[in-house]
Amino acid sequence: MGDQRQTEIARALSAAVRGEVDFGAAARALHTMDASNYRRVPVGVVAPRDAADVAAALEVCREHGVPVVPRGAGTSIAGQATGTGVVLDFTRHLRGIVSVDPEARTAVVQPGVVLDRLREEVRRHGLTFGPDPSTHSRCTLGGMIGNNACGSHSVAWGTTADNVERLSVVTYGGTELSLGPGGQGAPEGLTDLVGRHLAALRTGFPPGLPRRISGYALDALLPERGTDVARAFCGSEGTLAVLTEATVRLVESPPARALAVLGYADESAAADAAPGLLPLRPLTVEGMAEDLVRDPAARAALPRGGAWLFAETGGATPAEAAAHAARILRAAGALDGTVVTDPAGRRALWRVREDAAGTATRTAGGTEAWPGWEDCAVPPARLGAYLRDFRALLAEHGLTGTPYGHFGDGCIHVRIDFDLVSDAGVGRFRRFSEDVAGLVVAHGGSLSGEHGDGQARAELLPRMYGDELVALFGRFKDLWDPAGGMNPGMLARPARLDENLRFAVLPRERVDVAFGYPHDGGDFTTAVRRCVGVAKCRVEGPEQGPGVMCPSFRATGEERHSTRGRARLLHEMLAGEVVTDGWRSPEVRDALDLCLSCKGCRSDCPVGVDMATYKAEFLHHHYAGRPRPAAHYAMGRLPYWLRLAAPLARPLNALLGVRPLAALAKRVAGIAPERDLPSLAPETFRAWFARRGAGAGGLLLWPDTFTDHLAPSVGRAAVTVLEAAGLRPGLPPGRVCCGLTYVSTGQLDHARRVMRRTLDTMAPVLGSPVVVLEPSCAAALRTDLPELLPDDPRAHRLAASVRTFAQALEEHAPDWRPPRLDRPVAGQTHCHQHAVLGDAAERRLRERAGLTGGLSGGCCGLAGNFGFERGHYDVSVACAEDRLLPAVRAAAPDAELLADGFSCRTQLDQLAGRRARHLAEVLAEGLEG
């Protein structure tokens, strides 16, 4: 489409709708992909505010002959949330819960409402919405209706279509319809079409399939099925009309739940056992094999076996739910099993299963694996036989995959190590897809059992339904959408399954980069395409547990400020079609500007996207050979400036106490005017240590910049505790720096120079354990150092020697007993500690000291230089208000506020007026007491 026509359409839409209209490069790039293998570039994006906006947008698109793609969270795995027309984004505004009727057990919702928000709203009535796909924390009801989503509880509560009562839609032609049973809302000609093809509709759909999602559900229009037009609309993938409101049915949610975890010899044995559990009426029967469980801690929590079934039960009381689970355990014929009633234990096990869509994107050997044959379903009684044949077919094609999924419904998910980059690999992908479609049909199955056909499978529908029924699908679509404007290329007259692959536009040659990307073969393109779009980074609302990702999205709610959004922009930057300025791209720069470099995605993203590293890489190239923002010079080179300032600490503190001088300094340095500048320590930690004359005993205490110049009390306390534990810490033999501030601002050449000088200094003592008190510095040494200097073996030796304060005590003074403090704690685990270092040793140390309770997850929002930079203050505060500040306000009056990171302590001091301390300081005070 030409630029002039595109501008005309954008102008017409802006005049017609009240919602946002964005035809810019960034908006288009953010919506080129969903969670599938496919990519299509839209003309533009409209975020309608209400149903009137939807109708107005459709009118403009119809007048200009532009197709429309309705889109929710964009977690579809078959490509149906991508398109070349105007994307209608329902995640901005049409996301309300209109009403809830607890007595009728119904709710009226708008299409953009997130499933978990609906479930939270109706929980107080003892109700829930039954279907719950693993993306329940971010998927929308509109998307679920479009795909007829199911989830793990479908053995009890069915698919989305089973739980829909009425739908309000607008067709591409502008007709508003209210769909329901009894033929309500049927477009003209539909009754006649059904009446003339009753025999085909009664015999053409395979029987005994609880998860038949493929094709249009035309059998729902049969007279004996109530001629339910709303049910037939479910699973239509945005190809018939645009949903504007839905009345959905709710189900009673058992007050108590338990989980029977059953171990079997292999996945086929588990699959053979699954149908036998259904008469016992479990809420779920989920299955997975050992090749999906790669975390040793998760594996240790499972019973003996090579595959497992998760059978959840409900009851009026915990005892009733546990007794129900125990009955299943006795009847299961498993090698081993256990009943889990503890909510935290159940959540941890479910997290392994729910993260599988991301975990499975890397094989056990580390190679990439992709959707493409993601979710077929066979009759549950055939599942064991199908899996054996499926594994054999994979081997025949030289492919590997990790099946898992809804064994009780016969529905299997799998990611396969297709080569979707080379022509030969794409050819094999096509041949395998054709062969496995035949295998599924031979077992009486459906090509899709949950995620729909999209572009991945719709071309193969004739193999399942035959030509006559598929031709009826086309005629059905034409009755709703005679102009063909609704999501063309899906379901009826689909695109080929090997067209529009998202990898085709990426460069084949390696991009010259600074980091080593050891988990991606040193290839930045491979690193960027890690993001498969499952959108765990888009979780909003109250979040529990230790997770961090993604604080900027949680603060703004904008796709471009999610990990996925930024990965999509980097993908399009490499492609060069929509984002055309390469490393100089303002679209990518602006999206990364609000990335806090918290590293949360490194651990919380199921596929390990590391946006902090990608941001540093981008900034390195973006500002190469040209001036940087003032904050990069001021805070990015903080270690240098603090070294210069150290001898003048007292007079500088006095000068910065003068408000006009402080304001001038902040303006020059690019620091937010709302921020107070931290005071310099009159005596650095290194100076105190040298004056004290302590001797070294093989354990080195790292004098990081923050501890040395801004918080030496933390270093002094650590020395007190370590010595009380019988250890004699020393300092490195010269000045050292981890390079963190240079890395976070993308000054990577400077960072490498600093790191090399540090390695030269540390050369005589490499191999000694190094205790790092500041979590961000420890994380930089553990990851950034070896990834920026991958060819220097000294970098790997130093990284391997890094220990946190609690880890050092646990390893080198295992018999030491900390002082008993016996009080509750509040505060936050540092985001870098969570993502890179882990906090198990800290939790054990707190427990031994009688410090009870947990610390919140999330990010404090200051995040080193981020919260100090001009323009970031509001987002920084919003991040703090997400988890940290509410946790501190809710803490008991006698609670000890803990924050091992200097940024976290500073944020609490400046926003809450509360003083938090490093764990070392609290223990040192206990020793002195």
Image: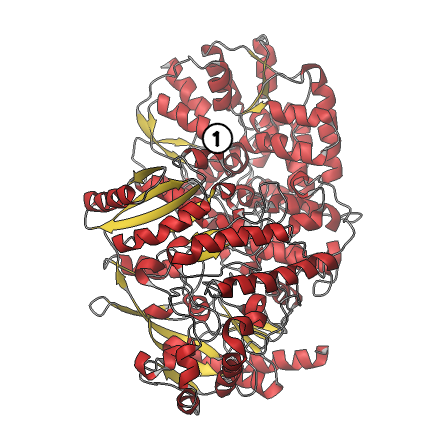
From this view, report whether residue 171 is shown above or below residue 397: below
- Residue under label 1, please give it: 900
Q: Residue at x 53, y 21 (%)?
A: 715
Q: Amino acid at mark 1?
A: Asp
From this view, report whether residue 602 is shown above or below residue 186: above
Instruction: Determine whether, in the image, residue 13 is placed left or right of residue 195.
Output: right
Q: Quadrant of the N terminus?
A: bottom right
Q: Residue at x 65, y 69 (%)?
A: 41
Along the line of sight, the residue nearer the viewer: 842 or 464: 464
SS for callout 1: loop
Instruction: Determine whether, in the image, residue 384 is placed left or right of residue 427.
Output: left
Tell me, yes or no, if residue 531 can be seen here.
no
Mark 1, Cα crowd under 10 Å, few <14 / some 14-19 / many 20+, is many
Provide residue 226's location: percent of width, then percent of height.
31, 81
Along the line of sight, the residue nearer the viewer: 142 or 508: 508
Specify the quadrant of the image occupied by residue 456: bottom right
Instruction: Determine whether, in the image, residue 19 is placed left or right of residue 893.
Output: right
Q: Quadrant of the C terminus?
A: top left
What number of labels is visible?
A: 1
Q: Residue at x 52, y 76 (%)?
A: 466
Provide residue 189's location: percent of width, then percent of height.
44, 92
Instruction: Determine whether, in the image, residue 699 is placed left or right of residue 858.
Output: right
From this view, report whether residue 757 is shown above or below residue 673: above
Provide residue 895's location: percent of width, then percent of height.
33, 31
Q: Residue at x 45, y 61 (%)?
A: 377
Specify the quadrant of the image occupied by residue 692: top right
Tell me, yes or no, if residue 330 can be seen here.
yes
Provide residue 841's location: percent of width, then percent of height.
45, 26
